[in-house]
Amino acid sequence: MKIMIGGSMTFAGEMKAARETLERLGYEAYVPLDTEQVSKDASKKTDMAFLKELGVGRGDAELVARSDAFLILNYEKYGIKGYIGPGAYRDLSVAWWLKKKIFFLFPYDEDQNHHKYEMLGFEPIILEGKLENIRNFLNI
């Protein structure tokens, strides 16, 4: 069972930790292509030459396609609980289109960007802040 992890790159360190947790639970887990570099140097998340060379965007979508499920680490950001930014939204759309199971670590703040109905249409499974809850929905 393969899980792609996504979310704001502000949480690159948390993505690495989530990958390790999911692997301990017996899953194969992927993170965005720039996770390692951004976790060491936050300026990389806005370095367009670096991101283009690495293939971020299309490459991340390919990881979603290879996965059985997509998990968004939607921690609070900008005072918004359950934040989902544009990159995660892009990958979320890919996961939905490819009929992957979709998980949010936390409930989505329906008022954050006026995408309430789009988010509800994705029918995410909310893990209530506990990665281990994913075991209730995915068989290994």
Image (cartoon, rainbow, N blue to C red):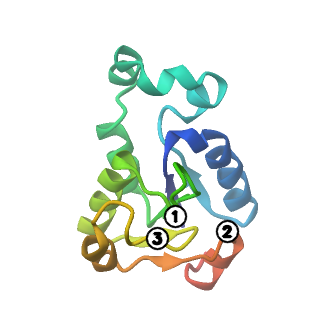
Q: In the rendering, which numbered label is found on residue 131?
A: 2
Residue that appears at 52% across and 48% down? 78
- Find residue 37 and name its label: none
Label 1 residue SS: loop
- State the residue in front, 135 or 38: 38
Q: For the residue labelled by badge 2, is the local secondary structure a helix, a strand or a loop?
A: helix
Mark 3 = which residue? 108
The reply to whether the C-beta atoms of the residues labelled 3 and 1 are less than 8 Å apart is: yes
Location of residue 4 in the rendering, given as x and y in whole percent from the top left corner: 49, 55
Provide residue 41's location: percent of width, then percent of height. 61, 21
Please, which residue is most extreme toward the bottom here?
A: 136
Tell me the SS state at disc 3. loop
Residue 114 coordinates in the image, percent (x, y): 28, 65
Please tell me which of labels 3 and 1 falls first in the chain. 1
Above or below — where is 127 with respect to 11? below
Q: Name the residue under label 1.
A: 82
Q: Which residue lies furthest to the right in this view?
A: 24
